[in-house]
Structures are given as C-alpha cells and as structure tokens.
C-alpha cells in the first residue's frame, strides 16, 4: 500500500513480479525482471524522473555502484505512484 500521508490518498500497488539479480563485486547490480516490481528513482539518479514506480513487463535494470538506475524495457509500462496518490 502506497499512501500520501498529507492527503490520505492510497493505492494498493501490485509488486508480484520476479527478478533475478546479479550482485557484482564493484557494488553494482543487474536485474532481469518479469512482471511488476516497485522501483524508486532519486533526483538525477536514473532514466526516470524522481519518484516511486510500478514497472511491469519484461525489462532489465542496471544499478551502478553509485545508485544510478538505467531501465531498459523490452515490453514494459511504468506507473508513477507519486502522481497516482498525489
């Protein structure tokens, strides 16, 4: 459940996907994902604007050792949960 504490608006997000995660020696990660998962992006820290998203479909995500996230979609959608509960 994602809730905006200021307004009380809430959304029950489906994050039932599956990910195989490769943890690398340098602290980076490589995710191969099928289905919906919750992904947070920081300000200037990824290929999506700052926020919390449900990313659903077939995709990969590379997370650098510094935390920068690169989302590469084969067939996927993104749902901006911050906008949804805004």
Image: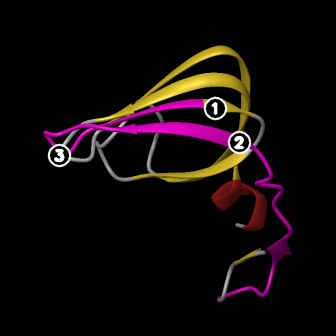
Residue 82 picture quarter: bottom right
Q: Magenta span covers which residues?
A: 6-32
Q: Mark 2 or mark 1, which has the lower sequence index?
A: 2
How would you rate the neighbour count of disc 1 (Cα within 10 Å): few for under 14, some for 14-19, many for 20 or more? many
Q: Is residue 25 above or below residue 4?
A: above
| Residue 16 falls inside the magenta stretch | yes
Q: Nearer the viewer, residue 31 or 48?
A: 31
x, y percentage for residue 17? 76, 44
Give the side of residue 80 with respect to residue 41, left or right.
Answer: right
Q: Residue at x 81, y 61 (%)?
A: 13
Of marks 3 and 1, the one in the foreground: 1
Q: Residue at x 32, y 51 (%)?
A: 43
C-alpha distance separating marks 3 and 1: 21 Å
Residue 18 picture quarter: top right
Give the side of residue 24 with respect to residue 34, left or right.
Answer: left
Q: Mark 2 or mark 3, which has the lower sequence index?
A: 2
x, y percentage for residue 23? 33, 41
Instruction: Provide the secondary structure element on which disc 1 rests.
Output: strand
Q: Which residue is mark 2?
A: 18
- Residue lying furthest top in this view? 74
Q: Is residue 74 above or below residue 44?
A: above
Q: Is residue 32 above or below residue 19?
A: above
Residue 57 picture quarter: top right
Q: Residue at x 76, y 42 (%)?
A: 36
x, y percentage for residue 84? 77, 58
Q: Which residue is mark 3?
A: 66
Q: Which residue is mark 1?
A: 33
- Residue lying furthest left in this view? 26
Question: Is the residue under label 1 in contact with that under label 2 (CB below 8 Å)?
Answer: yes
């Amino acid at each position: 459940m994602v809730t905006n504490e200021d307004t009380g608006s809430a959304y029950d997000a489906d994050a039932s996907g599956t990910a195989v995660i490769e943890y690398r020696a340098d602290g980076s990660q490589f995710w191969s994902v099928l289905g919906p998962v919750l992904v947070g992006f920081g300000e200037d820290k990824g290929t999506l604007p700052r926020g919390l998203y449900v990313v659903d479909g077939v995709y990969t995500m590379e997370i650098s050792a510094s935390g920068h996230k690169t989302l590469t979609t084969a067939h996927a959608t993104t749902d901006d949960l911050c906008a949804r509960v805004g």
